[in-house]
Amino acid sequence: LKISYKNPLTIMRGHKNYLFDENGKCFLDFYNNVPHVGHSHPRIAKLVFNQLKLVNSNTRYLHPIQKVISENILSRFSKNFSHVFLVNSGSEANELALRLAKAYSGSKEFITFDHGYHGNTNGVLEVSPYKFNKPNGIGRKKWVHVMDCPDPFRGVDPRYQIDRILDKLCSKNRPVAGFISEIFPSVAGQIIPQDGILKYIYKKVKKAGGLCIADEVQTGLGRLGEFYFGFEQQKVDPDIVVLGKPIGNGHPIGVVITKSKIAQSFDNGIEFFSTFGGSDLSCFIANEVLKIVDDENLKFNSKKMGNLLIKELEKLKSEFPIIGDVRGIGLFLGVEIITNIQTKEPGTLQAEYICNRLREKRILVGLEGPYDNVIKIRPPLCVDRDDIKTFLKFFSNILEETFLKTVPETH
């Protein structure tokens, strides 16, 4: 079990975008995307209390809320999407997405981005280079084909690698099952792919008979502000979309959304069953999360607060050469720390220093990227202007500290 920070943080309760430790100290949460609409939202707390007094069953039995949440989810997609599978987690949802693609294509050959992460079950670990390439990892299976991850800051455009991979599979008479990726690779460093990359890959994979799976666990449900889902921003049409923990605001649930012909191919005589997938409590919570995003206009708030953050972070970038790149959309943001402007040498130690210094100031952020040098900013969608000002104040003060004065003063 990985515990964040050198000195672990013990959290006892939360409220909106604040967390409180065992001593009652308050921390500003700029990291956790799981409490999508805020920690301990009163509408969700009330709903859970009331529902647990009635019934909390599993999917051996039906409950009307399963139909309600499925219809609510589908209302946010084009008419091409018709089927919803309710499961227990994002990992389980991604594993089911892989099974759907295998059933539809009759193949098990998958393509994915380097540094991609899709969960912790055996099935999804096989398509998660972020995990299988680690020391003592399972390594790449022969049916998994890895492309470079897009990276506008470092000029990495892998789109034409798809042709080489598909040609190789074709020459060996091994049809492709699908391509799976986070629409915006998160553990790869909060990456926003260059325009056209995903569109090109999707076109090639579909032409070859494979399916395109969009992992929207990190990006979906209004976090991007202007867009409800990342695939909308990229102007692509996935065959399968996966949602995870944010739709439950911390309660276990995962969702797979797909099209009729794909769902029908899964009706092959092998029963699919998820004991707690689609439990009435999970479904009530997920439905309430979607309603709160709408009722509290959190999609617009994400756009407004995200624009403010990007604007102010860009100002800091022009002032502090240790900031190599500011990127993101809405409240899905990354700040890449470097030690050399010309070579873009990753500032791994410097990023860790910033992260821990912010923690000392009671502000929580994360670190991502292949070099652990990208500061991940993903607050709950209810974050407000005062909280952003607080974050920017301490962040800019830390950038002034002697330890970080190691980069030539030119940008």
Image (cartoon, helix red, strand yellow):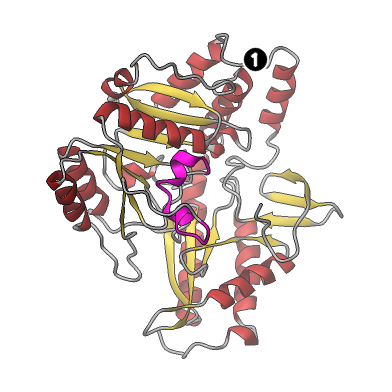
* Residue at 39% from the left image edge and 24% from the top image edge: 75
Residue 16 vertical position relative to residue 242 in the rendered view, above or below: below
> In the rendered image, which quarter is residue 401 located in?
bottom right
Residue at 39% across, 52% down: 184
Q: Which residue is mark 1?
A: 57
Q: In this view of the protein, which residue sits in the foreground, 119 or 11? A: 119
Q: Residue 183: horizontal and vertical position, in percent?
A: 37, 47
- For the record, the magenta segment spans 120-136
Question: Which residue in the rendered view is the most extreme toward the bottom?
Answer: 408
Of residues 309 and 189, the one drawn nearer to the viewer in this rendering? 189
Residue 187 percent across, percent down from the top left? 48, 56
Q: Which residue sits at x=59%, y=23%?
A: 276
Q: Residue at x 29, y 20 (%)?
A: 265
312 lies left or right of 47: left
Seen as rendered, the residue at the extreme right is 23
**Is 192 in front, or is 185?**
185
Q: Position of residue 264 (x, y in %)?
A: 30, 17
Q: Nearer the viewer, residue 130 or 377?
A: 130
Q: Quadrant of residue 203?
A: top left
In reply to whether residue 43 is colored magenta, the answer given is: no
- Above or below residue 155? Residue 200 is above
Number of numbered discs overlaid on the protein picture: 1
Q: Is residue 131 magenta?
A: yes
Looking at the picture, which amino acid does disc 1 mark?
A: Ser
- Left/right of residue 61 with respect to residue 4 in the rendered view: left
